[in-house]
Image: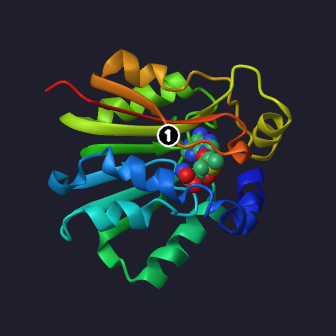
Amino acid sequence: MGWYDWFSSFYDSSLEALYADARAAAADGLSLSSAERVLDLPVGTGQSLGPLLERLDPSATVVGVDLSAGMVDKARARAERSGWGSRVELVVGDVHTVEVEGYDRLHVFLGMTAFPRHEEAFERLWAGLAPGGRAAVVDVYAEKPGFQGKMVNLVARADITRRAWEPLERLAEGFERVALPPNPKYGGELWLATGRKPS
Ligand SMILES: C[S@@+](CC[C@H](N)C(=O)[O-])C[C@H]1O[C@@H](n2cnc3c(N)ncnc32)[C@H](O)[C@@H]1O
């Protein structure tokens, strides 16, 4: 069992309430009313699926991908409980190798500080985004993490010293980055970045 498989067993009980408002902000930042297919990578236990689906047309779909089979199992259980049926497709895959394409929205929530090679990972994801499609990225940043930031890095196997919005900033039109309401538990600044792929 990998680290994230183990983490999946207490991920929702420890983190679901903490990030709920940020998930709504990220979903709003994607302008989902006109979207057809959203890629949510990493999907984790599926905490963002509800906020995304609530804003999508019933015929639109969300594809959720995560490296951890334990995380994806939790996301599958959530999808079954919620009766989302064919609106959600869940896949175990590595951002560095998985074949995903044909999506018009890209949602990357707490992934860019966790991926082994985040710049390369983002460029792969961007390549599969349809021209004119939007991306939303949420993550934590601390130039010099304090105690809580170090704990976040340890528990989430993350690196919150990454300026993880920069790949989107380089590639997108209409790039914006905003700080989300603070909470000491984040271990740094929680930010939301959005932008559009040139048509
Ligand atoms: C902090 S969790 C965030 C999960 C989810 N996006 C959320 O907001 O709750 C980081 C996730 O990144 C996934 N992950 C780490 N490396 C990955 C990779 N190379 N490819 C795909 N997913 C990866 C982990 O399995 C884990 O579920």
Q: Which quadrant, please, contains the N terminus?
A: bottom right
Q: Which quadrant, please, contains the C terminus?
A: top left
Whether label 1 lies within 8 Å of ligand 1 gets the answer yes
Q: Please name the residue shown 76% across and 42% down the image.
A: 152
Q: Quadrant of residue 19?
A: bottom right
Of residue 100 and residue 112, the one placed in the foreground of this image is: 112
- The answer to whether residue 67 shows anywhere in this view is no
Horizontal side, residue 55 vs residue 74: left or right: left
Q: Please name the residue shown 35% across and 31% down the image.
A: 126
Disc 1 target residue: 138
The amino acid beneath tag 1 is Val
Horizontal side, residue 190 vs residue 7: left or right: left
Residue 44 image offset from top left, x and y in percent = 57, 57
Q: Please name the residue shown 71% across and 53% down the image.
A: 4
Residue 57 image offset from top left, x and y in percent = 19, 65
Q: Callout 1: helix, strand or loop?
A: strand
Horizontal side, residue 188 vs residue 51: left or right: right
Total marks placed: 1
Residue 186 image offset from top left, x and y in percent = 68, 43
Residue 121 image offset from top left, x and y in percent = 49, 30
Horizontal side, residue 115 vs residue 138: left or right: right
